[in-house]
Amino acid sequence: MAREVRAYVDAVNARDLDALVAAFGPDGVVIDVTRPIRGHDAIREWARAEVIGGTLKVVSIAERRSNGQKLLVHWAPAGSGGWRAYYDFTVSGGRIVRADLQYA
């Protein structure tokens, strides 16, 4: 798994909000199904409200690219049995610049 992507997965499972935000470039964007979340402040608020406290298990690497990878994951928010989703990460300069999160 790409180092930048591993940093995100590890931060989610460690419940480390600061590390999750730091995995993104300053202008990074998360597309949560159709909702764009752009920049560190917005990513921090989204992660605090919707991510931290859940568990993220990587099922497989669905696609590898020179600038990122797409994962099939099992995402379980706190208090939920969870579901499968595709998390498609684009990386540049050692940080995530885009994370596109879609139901599988």
Image: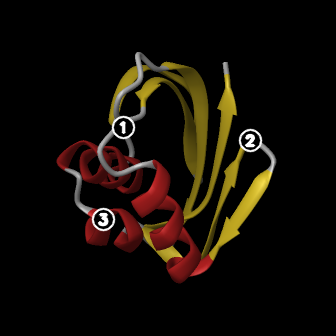
In the rendered view, does 36 fall on the left or right side of 78? right
Marks 1 and 2 sit apart, C-alpha to C-alpha, by 23 Å
Residue in view at x 35 percent, y 28 percent: 79
Please name the amino acid that badge 3 sits on: Leu
Query: Which quadrant, please, contains the N terminus?
Result: top left
Query: Front-most of 88 and 20?
Result: 20
Q: Residues within 10 Å of mark 1 (few under 14, many from 20)?
A: some
Marks 1 and 3 sit apart, C-alpha to C-alpha, by 21 Å
Q: Are marks 1 and 3 in contact (CB under 8 Å)?
A: no
Q: Residues within 10 Å of mark 3 (few under 14, many from 20)?
A: some
Query: Front-most of 54 and 57?
Result: 54
Q: Residues within 10 Å of mark 2 (few under 14, many from 20)?
A: few
* Residue 50 locus on image (x, y percent): 48, 50
Q: Are marks 1 and 2 in contact (CB under 8 Å)?
A: no
Please name the amino acid that badge 1 sits on: Met
SS assignment at label 1:
loop
* Residue 101 locus on image (x, y percent): 64, 40
* Residue 19 locus on image (x, y percent): 27, 67
Is any part of residue 24 visible from this angle? yes
Tell me which corner region of the image, top left, top right, bottom left or bottom right, holds residue 39: bottom right
Query: Front-most of 84 and 49?
Result: 49
Per the image, the residue denoted by label 3 is 17
Is any part of residue 26 visible from this angle? no
SS assignment at label 3:
helix
Q: Compared to 34, does 41 lie above or below? A: below
Per the image, the residue denoted by label 2 is 33
Dot 3 or dot 2: first in sequence order is 3
* Residue 9 locus on image (x, y percent): 33, 44
Per the image, the residue denoted by label 1 is 1
Residue in view at x 67 percent, y 18 percent: 104
Tell me which corner region of the image, top left, top right, bottom left or bottom right, holds residue 70: top right
Any mark on residue 67, and which?
Answer: none
